[in-house]
Image (cartoon, rainbow, N blue to C red):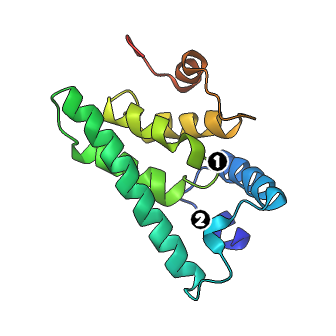
Amino acid sequence: MVKATMSNRHINDKIKLAGFLKLLEMVGKGDFTFLNNNDSRSLEEKLKEHVARMFEKVYRIANREVLQKKSILDNEKTQLLKILVTKYHMGIDTHVDILAIYIGRSLIRTRSQLEDAILYLMSLDSQEVNLELFEQNCGIQNQVN
């Protein structure tokens, strides 16, 4: 898994490193509940299901935000959500809702902002997020939190 990720040129190197640190932390804590040994499905099947569930979750959250703004979940937002769940979701499961909200509100508009947001969230030692610091570190301009 490590070799495959390291050779993937589509993932930012800083995020790869932060992800591996989170992965080691998760292994140390035994936080791989979706890899239950009593399940007969292959690892690939489990990961596909995990990613599909996560996409459904972030899509619903982002869509709720755009509906509140009387907007639409356009292709750019959908692409950011796809990038989030297919490339960068590992290690930020507890913060994925925040990212979906910010994408839905058009506060995270680019892949670069998404990567900055992910790096910031991966650097946190707790689940608590100071939204003001988060926005400052990610170049997000928000009038109302």
- Label 2 vs label 1, nearer the camera: 1
Quadrant where the image shows the N terminus: bottom right
The tag on residue 121 is none
Rendered location of residue 101, percent (x, y): 39, 34
Please tell me whether residue 123 is drawn above or below residue 10 in the rendered image: above
Please identify the quarter of the rendering in which residue 71 is found.
Answer: top left
Quadrant where the image shows the C terminus: top left
* Point 48% across, 33% down: residue: 113
Rendered location of residue 136, percent (x, y): 56, 18
Mark 2 vs mark 1, CA separation in Å: 12 Å
Label 2: state its secondary structure.
loop
* Point 38% across, 27% down: residue: 107
Please tell me whether residue 8 is drawn above or below residue 76 in the rendered image: below
Disc nearer the start of the sequence (2/1): 2
* Point 22% across, 28% down: residue: 68
Please identify the quarter of the rendering in which residue 74 is found.
Answer: top left
Label 1: state its secondary structure.
helix
Front-most of residues 78 and 36: 36
Q: Which amino acid type is marked by label 1?
A: Ile
Please tell me whether residue 132 is drawn above or below residue 66 in the rendered image: above
Q: Which residue is mark 1?
A: 15
Q: Is residue 64 left or right of residue 30?
A: left
Q: Which amino acid type is marked by label 2?
A: Asn
Q: Which residue is mark 2?
A: 8
Q: 10 Å neighbourhood of mark 2: few (<14), some, or many (≥20)? A: few
Rendered location of residue 51, percent (x, y): 46, 64
